[in-house]
Image: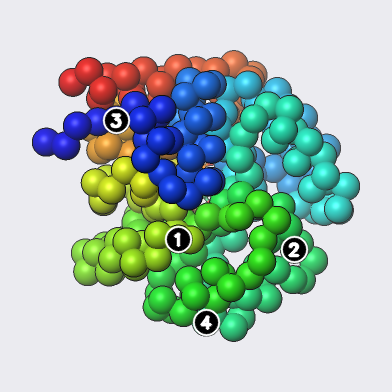
Amino acid sequence: KPKVLGYRERAKLCSNPITQRLFEIMEKKRTNLALSADLTDSKQLLQLIDKTGPYICIVKTHIDILEDFSEDFIEKLSQLASKHEFLIFEDRKFADIGNTVVHQFSGGVYHISNWAHIINAHTVPGAGVIQGLKMVKTQNGCGCLLIAEMSSAGNLATGDYTQATVKMAEENKDFVIGFISVSNLSPDPELVHMTPGVQLECGRDDLGQQYLTPSEVITRRGSDVIIVGRGIYQAPDPAEAARQFQVAGYDAFVARLTE
Ligand code: 6AU
């Protein structure tokens, strides 16, 4: 059984500055919680992020669901990222040929490459999607997560598809920093695993989302980061909910360390 490393040790082993910074933040703030900030009003979204900021290592955005996007939103989000020390992950799920994703990443309305620290991509187009994204000049030296598995019922990211995705990550470690997955797929300490579909109790929603608990995800399945949306922003007190997920996620990691 491979030895489980603490966040500080992981940070030292990472050659990519984004993963290095991520593990340093996780160590310093004692958190493996990513907030999935899926609100559609920018003012409410910024308030949510400011309140939950102390408990999280990452804010994950779906920038294209904002009803009132502006450059000012990006500026305020980046200020909050400095204030609270978290990374910004734009969950754009790039999934097209290299030439198209170059434009989707750098251009359009959102200019994601100017502000995101982390992005993600489906591997269904083949390695060209990675080659394209990698070509784009970025502000923050952005790192990419490959979607190797999904949380939703009946998804097709399984078996050979998942294994081929792991291989693509291992072959592109200058840019790929890890996976969206629901299990541990690679023992390489430089590759980070982030898992969505997390609540304090197992269950599902009406549209195929399936939930696991922090201890199932972190202790038993060996993932690194829990991604939580509705479990936090639909709670009566989102800051208190974020604190609970921080504690549950961190305790689950300590349990794995000491197993
Ligand atoms: O906690 P929830 O269910 O409210 O939100 C989960 C978040 C959503 C999804 O778009 C995203 O996680 N997600 C992803 C990601 C992060 O790539 C992959 C996946 O398989 N399932 C999933 O829910 O913002």
- The residue tagged with tag 3: helix, strand or loop? loop
Q: Is residue 68 above or below residue 163?
A: above
Q: Is residue 51 above or below residue 189?
A: above
The residue indicated by pointer 4 is 97
Residue 42 location, quadrant = top right
Q: Residue at x 61, y 49 (%)?
A: 117
- Residue 254 seen from this side: yes
User: Could you give the CA–CA distance between mark 2 and mark 1, rounded to whole angstroms?
Assistant: 22 Å
Q: Residues within 10 Å of mark 1 (few under 14, many from 20)?
A: few
Sequence order check: which comes first, mark 3 or mark 2? 3
The residue indicated by pointer 2 is 111
* Amino acid type indicated by mark 3: Leu
The residue indicated by pointer 1 is 174
Q: Residue at x 31, y 43 (%)?
A: 189
Q: Position of residue 1 (x, y in %)?
A: 11, 36
User: Could you give the CA–CA distance between mark 1 and mark 4, rounded to whole angstroms?
Assistant: 20 Å
